Image (tube, rainbow, N blue to C red):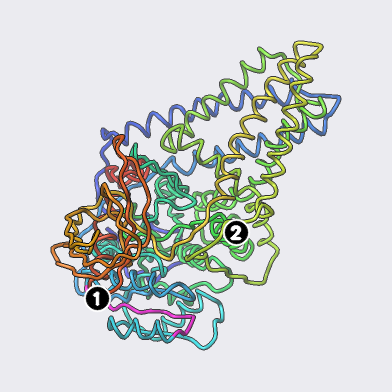
Amino acid sequence: MSTDNGKTRNGPPKPFDPSLPRRDSSWWGVRLALLRVVIIIAIFFSIRYFYWRATETQNYAALWFFYLFLVAEIVNFFEVVLFYFIIWRTRHYAELPPLEGKSVDVFITTFNEPVELLRETVVCAVSIRYPHKTHLLDDGNRPEVRELAREFDCGYIARTERTNAKAGNLNNALKHTDGEFIVTLDADHVPSPELIDSMIGFFASANVAIVQATQDFYNLDSFQHLTDWRTKFAWQQQELFFGVIQPGRAGYNAVYYCGSPAMLRRKALEEIGGFATETITEDVHTGLRLQKRGYEVVYFNRTLARGLAPQTFSSFATQWQRWGVGAMQVLRLENPVFGRGLTLGQRLAYFCGFYFFWTGYQRMIYVLTPIFALLTGIFPLVAEPIEYLYYFGFYFLLNSLASASLQGGLRDFLFSEEFNLLKMHVMMKSLGGFFRRKRDFKVTPKARHGAPVWTEIWPQVAIIVGSVLAIFIGWQRLLTARSDFDFWALVVNLFWASFFLITTASVAWRALTRKELRMSYRFPSQLDVPVTLSFDFKGGAKTDKLFARNLNRFGFSVTCDYAIPPGTKLEADMVVMGKPIKARAVVMRNQEVEFQKKKLVANGIRFDKIDAVDQDQISKYLFWEVAPRHNNILRLTKLTQTQEPNA
């Protein structure tokens, strides 16, 4: 392991080697080797397909349409090739022994998030096992946050102005602290007790400036999650990035610093003047600057904190818009593709990340092509059906097989494509960040939020309407087709129009109907929390021993074969992580549910009087014990986090 003092940062970055042997006989190694073979074969058949497309399929009646669609196909294929490049050198690390006796500051940035949500992060942050000091960085300058810091003996750092938004907040905190290492956490990212122990060992190499852990989320019912509790399957939209792409970028030392959760070396930050302030993605920008100085950004693919994913499309779009605009700002200011300070692998890796946002236009052309073809009877290419199937079939199937395998399977692959169609217009708009100099930082909403209006997804609504009309007219044309070419061309375009209609309608409906009515997430399903309820029922005292469901620090529910009338006062006794908890509560609502063909009643209960320390105990139990169990149904995350390490 490198132990140089890191004073000279003029050459290319040194590869980080934690002296962990690569096991080529491991399941992951064999799988990756097989995928590389498939990728090579897929690229061969792709080149073969595009040569045929460019030389043998011209539609001379509409050459503009031919070239437009061909360019869209090439743009799509280039995206796939860049994806293959990224995962070619996938790197996984095992945890290293923690360094002892180091000083660590934990920064929790906040602006306007609900104090109840912030409290859960603070409760767990101050309980991180490694000795440290927790600081609340309050850009909202709120008295209630100051009081929260006092209650937990945290540092409280506030500003009277909000220059440079989050980056300015972090830089201000650097002036008032002196820890050798810094942990950055968002207000909603609740850390695990082992967070510092798991990351600080990597800093034994003086070349390491940042250790980035995966971003995981505890609210599995968010807009970006698809969860089926009955089959114990869950997928979330960022699994591909954190489970596959980030380990791939690690092979080139091109890991994105994503802000939370991560640990940084203060000395390295000081060398570049602190957190980057010129863009709205200060995290990615800061990480890139450190890599250009020759430092390493390590990606440790473990869940060490869990955050709150966007609950509605509006929040989801706000987040992606910020990322896209920030990426374009970083591209303009830092020029990582052609500028100095990066290796060829790093340049290509960063180009891949920025290129993804440009593909929104290509997807739009893909979606509009079958609509236009069915409405006008003009097709983007001319070919014999069997010949088209022969060339396109191998190209499409092999690349789909490789991509789906890398993304966890066909189901995960299709889910990703659905969400790409939904955020297509958001990605297109984000390209304006390349020309926009004004910083416009918007915090992702974390509390109650209504469903969006249809104008927020008007491109998808227009696609749905256009697809329905095109399919109707296409069927009319099919019934009167004059040649085999017309017949099969119409069949192919009807298939793709139907595919895009189904996928777009599915996510558009989800976007228009998904809203958030609660202030705090309730962890679903049966929990290992016995609760004894005492209350008056039908004129007499009743005591019942049940199990809490849908628990959070504000209440829970119990399911039994009878309804407890709303407004009923309860005495609740439960044991959480070995600690007895007594509380007063009130029944808020009843809802009939069916379990094993038997009708039961779920009784929603809110705490009326409970000690704050008992609420904090509930929070620790939920985030440290329940959330990890629930996250195990995220199959791709679980798969990638259990791979054997390689050097």
As drawn, is 371 to the left or to the right of 645? Answer: right
Along the line of sight, the residue nearer the viewer: 299 or 524? 524
Residue drawn at x 23%, y 75% as measured from the top left: 613
- In magenta stretch: residue 149: no
User: Would residue 614 be found to the left or right of residue 301 on screen?
Assistant: left
Question: Is residue 3 visible in the rendered structure shown here?
Answer: no
Q: Residue at x 45, y 37 (%)?
A: 412
Depth-wise, is mark 2 or mark 1 nearer the camera?
1
Residue that numbered label 2 is attached to = 321
Q: Which residues are magenta?
A: 131-142
Residue indicated by mark 1: 611
- Tell me which corner region of the image, top left, top right, bottom left or bottom right, holds residue 230: top left
Which three-letter amino acid code belongs to the residue tagged 1? Asp
Residue at (22, 53) in percent of width and height: 547
Residue 222, how many percent across, how many down?
Answer: 45, 53
Q: Which residue is more in the foreground, 372 or 344? A: 372
Q: Is residue 133 magenta?
A: yes
Which secondary structure, mark 2?
helix
Tag 1's secondary structure?
loop
